[in-house]
Image (cartoon, rainbow, N blue to C red):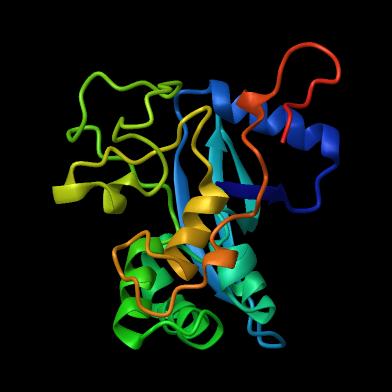
Amino acid sequence: MRMLKRVGAPLAALVVAVLAAACDGDDTRTITNVQRPDTVTVVRRDTVRVGNNNLVFNQIERLGNPLVSEALLEKRLHGFHNTTNPSTDRRNFRDDLKGFVANVAKRDTAYAGAVANALLPDMLMVFPNRASGVTANQTDESALVGWLTYVLAPNNTGYGGRKLDRDDVVDKALGVVFGAALGNTNNVSPGLTTDNVRDSQQDPNTFPYVAAP
């Protein structure tokens, strides 16, 4: 997800501009990278044409795979990550992500590389040709749809994407980094493979609204 901020524009004007851009079928976008001399931050700028007007936006944040930028990259890299593109993620962040898995999770180097390849580029992957008939609210736990199923399912059969429920992305990410989700059982940390947050689907609809332990 990319978040854009209008340069030097009031909030009201920004809202109008974004709505206009969303409704106008004649949108174009040009992208340039600008390197400021006083900082290492790369500022991305998008030019969006709405009618006869060119509106300039700055990209200030992007989110892709859960926990990648928030937990697996060092804080000093967050601003750089926010202003770059997924196409450069492996070049810019693969070594850092591998370092987290190898040095913090204490996994072997080959496995750390496999995790980096699975989570980068930092974008939600969907393979619609791999699973026909699945839906975003599918509750069947065996369905090959949901986050990271494109690497967790056997023989490249996972659809990927996200489900509306029963798709615990935090536990999946922790299972990949600290557990055996990708098949490597060496030096796993079982106590770190879940956030211990119960699936809210198990809670009743009547008071006290929380299922028994």
Q: Residue at x 28, y 54 (%)?
A: 151
Q: Residue at x 31, y 72 (%)?
A: 114
Residue at the left extreme, as displayed: 155
Q: Residue at x 47, y 77 (%)?
A: 97
The x and y percentages for residue 176 are 43, 63
Give the camera-side residue of 116 and 32.
116
Q: Residue at x 25, y 18 (%)?
A: 133
Q: How many marks?
A: 0
Q: Quadrant of residue 130?
A: top left
In the picture, which quadrant includes the C terminus? top right
Residue at the top extreme, as displayed: 206
Residue at the front extreme, as displayed: 213
Q: Quadrant of residue 144?
A: top left
Q: Is residue 152 above or below residue 77?
A: above
Q: Is residue 83 visible from the viewing direction of this image?
A: no
Q: Is residue 18 above or below residue 109?
A: above
* Left or right, 211 with reference to 41: right
* Left or right, 126 with reference to 3: left
The x and y percentages for residue 71 are 62, 67
* Left or right, 158 with reference to 41: left
* Left or right, 70 with reference to 158: right
Q: Is residue 71 visible from the viewing direction of this image?
A: yes
The x and y percentages for residue 59 are 62, 56
